[in-house]
Amino acid sequence: MEGRRRFAAVAVVAACSCGLPFVATQADTAQITADAPALHGVSDAQWAHLFDAQRSLAERQQWLADVERNAATADDHTLYLLGTLYHMGQHAPGSPVQADNAKAALYFANAALRGHVMAMAKMAELKYASGEFREAMNWAQIYAHYAPLAGNLGPAAQSYAGELVLRIQANLDPSALDAIMKDVGQFIAANDAVIRAGMATPGAPSDLHPTTHKRHYASTPNERPPGAGIADYLVSFGTDGHADTVLLLDVAPQLDLGQVMRGYVASMSVAPLTGGDAHATRYAWIPVVMGDRQYHNWSRPKTRSP
């Protein structure tokens, strides 16, 4: 029972310090479903400006402070990208902040409660990296429960989900698993309605649909195969539709996996611009899951503005 109370309270305590509504009970779920504030999002182009070293650090930090000040009414995508920002810190080129796991966990957890399935996996990875294996398994099982509901769960994503669970399980006493699954069941029972409502909420329309024929990582005979992982990239596309820049925003469980998956993202393209469109550069957040040497573009179930 003590473990279940601890799991339910983790993000609630953190949320109190930043004003973010983290749903922990069925009563909270009903209240948010009925009286939810109008959620706002931040475009991928605006996120690109945050990493633009040509802009002053003070200007970028002020913009970020404004976004965080309104985090209580931010949509799941904005909360998720705030989490990636603080999870990766200055491992992301041009990042204006240092890594802060407490902030990353706060934003990921709230994004997860608003229906962002990848945030559930990131919570599992964050807790695994910090040695909180019971918490990590809670989130891994929550991710495994909701990932199939998000649609298009290909072999690579299935492989990653299985590897994630096994990696965490290796650090747990088998006797703890029954209690963990009870924790997970209680969490889902309390929060399922608001999570599903978030997953079903449509976002702003987008005409960007990055595609690529690349699906497998080709390793050399003597090369050690890459492990399973999850990463986020912010990509700019030129007028011809090809990727111009590929910025790694976040990656887990190992930093070097970001470079392994970069080639897959760089091979993506979108429809070329025609008619002298003034907005020559377009941006897209591209999430990637790798498992069993296969790539999976975990496209947003809700399309958003570029």
Image (spheres, rainbow, N blue to C red):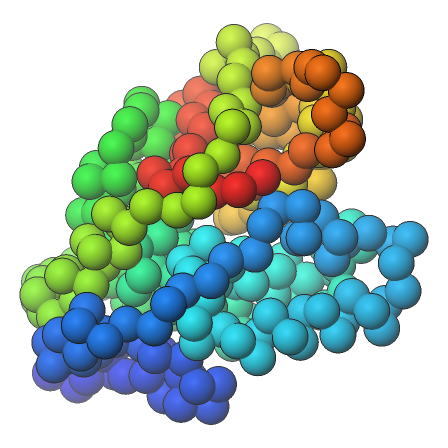
Q: Residue 52 placed where, x, y %? A: 82, 52
From where the camera sits, is residue 219 visible?
A: yes
Q: Between residue 80 and residue 292, name the one nearer to us.
A: 80
Q: Residue 279 placed where, x, y %? A: 74, 33
Give the residue displayed 40% in from the left and 90% down from the top. Answer: 16
Q: Residue 125 placed where, x, y %? A: 43, 55
Give the residue displayed 57% in from the left and 79% down from the top. Answer: 69
Relative to 211, residue 163 above or below = below
Relative to 130, residue 15 above or below = below
Give the residue displayed 35% in from the left and 53% down from the top. Answer: 116
Relative to 58, residue 154 above or below = above
Give the residue displayed 67% in from the left and 53% down from the top. Answer: 46
Left or right of 184 on screen, residue 86: right
Q: Residue 51 placed where, x, y %? A: 76, 53
Q: What is the residue that sits farthest to the front in this orientation?
A: 275
Of the 4 image quadrants, the one containing the N terminus is bottom left
Q: Quadrant of residue 152?
A: top left
From where the camera sits, is residue 225 visible?
A: no
Left or right of 247 on screen, residue 146: left
Q: Quadrant of residue 151?
A: top left
Q: Between residue 35 and residue 15, name the one nearer to us.
A: 35
